[in-house]
Image (cartoon, grey):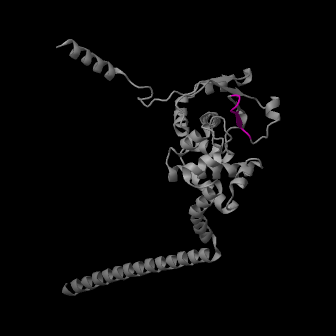
Amino acid sequence: MTGHATRTALLLAALLTIVPAGASGAVESPVLVVEAPDELAGVARQTRALDTGRLASIMRLTGLTEPGGPIRVLLAPESARLARDTPPWVAAFANAGADIVVLFPARIGSYPYSSLETVLFHEVAHILTARAAGGGRIPRWFNEGLASAAERTWGLGARSRFAWEVIAGGQRSATALEGLFYGSDRDVARAYALSDALVRDLLERYGSDAPARILARMAGGAPFEAALFAVTGYPIEGVMLSFWARHDTWKSWISAAGHPFTQWSIITFLALAAIWSQRRRRRERRRQWELEEQAEQDEWEEHRRRYRLH
């Protein structure tokens, strides 16, 4: 082999052994630094033991390839002044500018704060979303909906909550939806359910990378409204109207099911079906009785015939 050929072969071998960064598909998760008073030492150990690998799905959804700096996780007891100054239905919050998540463990356990892991990763998702947006202002409904979509599937419970909110609360504009987050605990729960459904609708219509594309444009300096329009072709209110137009069918069907005429029709149908079923059973019993009577008659006739022969 010539010297030139040897050098070429060695170069090709070297190139084949090089693995580009990120080619394996692995995404590094952010480092969480948990801090807690002695009375919450057990919860702190539980928090540190959580699998942060799940945060990779949030990073992929937001388009982040680097996790950024460590995130402080502060566990606060109800006796702390911070807990007393925070509304009782708030189980946690994130300060993206300071890279801090605050958890109130005693408040975790009901929707949308179903578990320690769910709440922690939800709040960390807000910080990662802010990093992906380059610090730009993100509407609360998009921020909360994105975190919810990243942490869990849209199961029966979430679908049922959304269906109920469609019936109970009706359609909401983007401004009205944003305002729900600053209302009562019932308003906040409604805001979470609607935001979750709205962001999942965006993912379904415009692709799983739609949030990443929106956030990337924001990181480039575009406001959220412009970034949303560039990705979807609609302004915010257009996205909302399109969303409600597609999901109004749920309300029509559920409203129809709750209409008195529909209910009486169903009751009448069930009553007629019950009557028909009862009559059918009666006919079957009558037929069975007739067969039994005929069998007894035949047996008696056979007995009489044999008696005459004797």
Q: Residue at x 51, y 53 (%)?
A: 205
Q: Residue furthest bottom?
A: 308
Q: Residue at x 75, y 51 (%)?
A: 179
Q: Residue furthest front?
A: 4
Q: Residue at x 63, y 39 (%)?
A: 221
On the rendered image, what quadrant is the N terminus found in?
Answer: top left
- Is residue 159 located in the magenta-colored stretch of the structure? no
Q: Residue at x 72, y 33 (%)?
A: 104
Residue 11 figure quarter: top left
On the rendered image, what quadrant is the C terminus found in?
Answer: bottom left
- Expressed as whole percent of the image width and height from the top left, the position of residue 120 reads 63, 33
Q: Which residues are magenta?
A: 90-98
- Expressed as whole percent of the image width and height from the top left, the position of residue 188 reads 72, 48
- Expressed as whole percent of the image width and height from the top left, the position of residue 25 reads 43, 31
Name the one closer to the observer, 41 or 291. Answer: 41
**Vertically, is 181 above or below 73?**
below
